[in-house]
Image (cartoon, coloured by chain):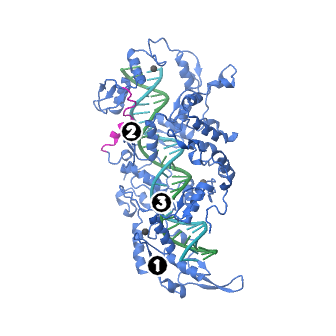
Chain colours: A blue, B cyan, C green
Amino acid sequence: MATRTSTRSTKAVKFVDSAESDEDEDLDKSSVLPINSVSKKPRGRPPKSRRSQPNDDEEWDGGNEQIDEEDDEIHEDHKIDIERDVTKTMHMNRSTDSVYDFGETSRKWTKSTPQRNNIVSKASVSDSGKTMEKLMCSYCNYTTTKKYLLQRHLKSHSTERPHKCAYCDRSFKTTIQLTNHVNTHLGVKPFQCKFCAFSFTTSGELIRHVRYKHTLEKPHRCEECGYATVELSKLRRHIRTHTGEKPYACPHCSYCSPDTFKLKRHLRVHTGERPYQCTICNFRFTQSNSLKAHMLTHQAEKPSFPCSYCPSVMARKSDLRYHVSKQHSRQSEPLPCNKCDEDFPDKYTLRMHGKTHKGQTIHSCTNCEFSANTSQQLEDHMNKHRGTRPFQCSECGLMFAARADLRAHITRTHKNASAAIVTNPPTIGNRRPQRRAASLQHRYIGMSSGPEDEEQQHEEEDGYHCSICQRQFTSARLLDRHTFAVHEQKHDVYDERDYQTNEINEDDVHDYADDELEEKINHKIINKNENIVEGMEEDDYDEEEEDLAPHVEDIAEGDEDMEQIPTIKSVSSANKKQIGIIRKSDDQESFSDKRKFNINRTTFIPNEDEKPDLDVFGFDG
DNA sequence: AACACGTTCGCCCTCTGCTGGAAACCT
DNA sequence: AAGGTTTCCAGCAGAGGGCGAACGTGTT
Ligand SMILES: [Zn+2]
Ligand SMILES: [Zn+2]
Ligand SMILES: [Zn+2]
Ligand SMILES: [Zn+2]
Ligand SMILES: [Zn+2]
């Protein structure tokens, strides 16, 4: 029996029985997901009635076929005669396996047991003193005083679908349902949003749209953290983040997902499916955002996250955070210089100091302040300025600017192969000719099920594991970064400028980030960011969070939308976080209407229409 | 019957942030 | 030249937004 340990889902709660089994072969076939076919189903509710599932959103419908088939068979045998149900007291001695006997497993019925065997006509006295009949459904606990309502209600227990679609083979219980359905065939969308150009097939869709996009009314609120949402299903999904409930188990590994979307996405690591392809280099990705991030590597203008303490510029927020923690956080022990007896509080200042000890070097670069001990080193360095990569790996074709790097590549990547250094005539402009994406492709050749499959690494005894969350890592460096990223949000950052002996004139403080701005930034974008920041309360500034918003946004050249007042949608996520749109579990207020309005003030032009009014959905009788 | 509207199931998308590992850089 | 460190990038999971469609029920 394979003992599978998951490094990622330690708190996974499995609700799928089959997932408890260690033998994949023994999995209940009805709950096994088809590995290669994540079938595309028609949207909307399926034609057949089905049992309730434990969750309401992102339902995984694999494995329900059986149930549905059973239902159908039984339905054939037990058609309800609605007319008789209503007009007479009915005595149907239905067997316990009747299709109507779905109460016990269905959420809907768990609270009270419906009256089964008859339609009860209770005498009750109405306000007017007139005796009214209280009619009860014999299949559920529905009651009404109106006969026609009960009659209509009984349709919900029936399988009769007299209204057939002329365009497909579906049929419906009511004409309204049919009409709506036919409209989907015809593209008729009678419900037009009065705030925008969208229109919808049903009124419900319009109402929901208006709440999402225009009134921002969110009727469903999490009592635990204040998160609010338009749809109940979204609240239910959200609550799983508190409970840790993960009902959807991967049949191929120990991963468990809280919803079907993540499971479906996860399954790609087993199927090897890569639906997102780069149009420039043809490399494929499993997730859309991986492609999006990749496209930046083809782009000349990349988002930049400049460090506020030194001239370094990172391409990613998390890298900047790591950089700051590594380079600028005060060490527990001062770092001594090994050439003199000075010591320094952080790595960066030590390194800068180290440069002052540099002796005379003969070979210095004319383009920058680099200097080398040998002419060959300088020659390799110059390749960087020229953009040439003369050193090619004979094994995989990867090209390098410096022979040392190729050598390192060979020892790292082709340990056992007989790779050799090939020196190519210098080629110009070959910036990172086949890094990453292209060069990674060979890793998957012949691996039917992708990289993750072989894993379940026999956790080396000498692995590095986090003392806080127990997670294992393959190197000290990765553990280090993990600790910074996950467990140490705050650092004691050493800012050299704070310790200069001379009095510092505010204006003299050099903000490296500003250099970046001056050089690269489109003023429109800056203004946009500034606007948002202006909307913040003083207190909202988190010192540690410094400047984590990218200074160059990933916006196509000549984007016409730039002149517009940014909408919530166009606020970068980093900024959203700063102004509190994104959930903060410790800040209930961020969801209050007051707060919401603050957001509107800085990102939206508030107007009267913001307030939900009675006619907001535009139904005019 | 038509309307209004809440509910439910389902699909897909984006944004975010951490991780693994290789290239690039530095000493 | 070699080895260590930093940066870069793909991989991938968490969380939430938005919509399509059907169903059910009270009201008109
Ligand atoms: Zn149809
Ligand atoms: Zn919550
Ligand atoms: Zn899996
Ligand atoms: Zn590409
Ligand atoms: Zn140079």
Return the x and y of residue C17 as percentages of the image width and height: 56, 53
Disc 3 to disc 2, C-alpha distance: 38 Å
Residue C18: quadrant of the picture: bottom right
Does label 1 or label 2 sit earlier along the sequence?
Answer: 1
Q: Residues within 10 Å of mark 3 (few under 14, many from 20)?
A: some
- The boundaries of the magenta stretch are A428-446
The label number, if any, that marks residue A15 in the structure image? 3
Q: Tell me what residue is drawn at x 42 percent, y 24 percent.
A: A384
**Nearest to the observer: residue A67 or residue A143:** A143
Disc 2 target residue: A437
Q: Within 10 angstroms of label 2, few (less than 14), some, or many (20 or more) residues?
A: some
**Is A616 included in the stretch rendered in magenta?**
no
- Indicate the amino acid at tag 3: Phe
Q: Tag 2: residue type?
A: Ala
**Label 2: which secondary element:** helix
Q: Earlier in the sequence, mark 3 or mark 2?
A: 3
x then y, percent, for residue A170: 42, 71
Pinpoint residue A318: horizontal percent, then vertical percent.
53, 37
Q: Earlier in the sequence, mark 1 or mark 3?
A: 3
Which residue in the rendered view is the most extreme toward the left?
A418
Q: What is the residue that sits farthest to the bottom in this orientation? A: A88
Q: Is mark 2 within 8 Å of ligand 4?
A: yes
Of tags 1 and 2, the one toward the viewer is 2
Q: Which residue is mark 1?
A: A96
Three-letter code, disc 1: Thr
- Distance of mark 1 from mark 3, alpha carbons? 27 Å
Q: Assess mark 1: CB under 8 A from ligand 1?
A: no
Q: Residue furthest right?
A: A128
> Which residue is located at x 40 percent, y 73 percent?
A70
Question: Number of numbered discs present?
Answer: 3
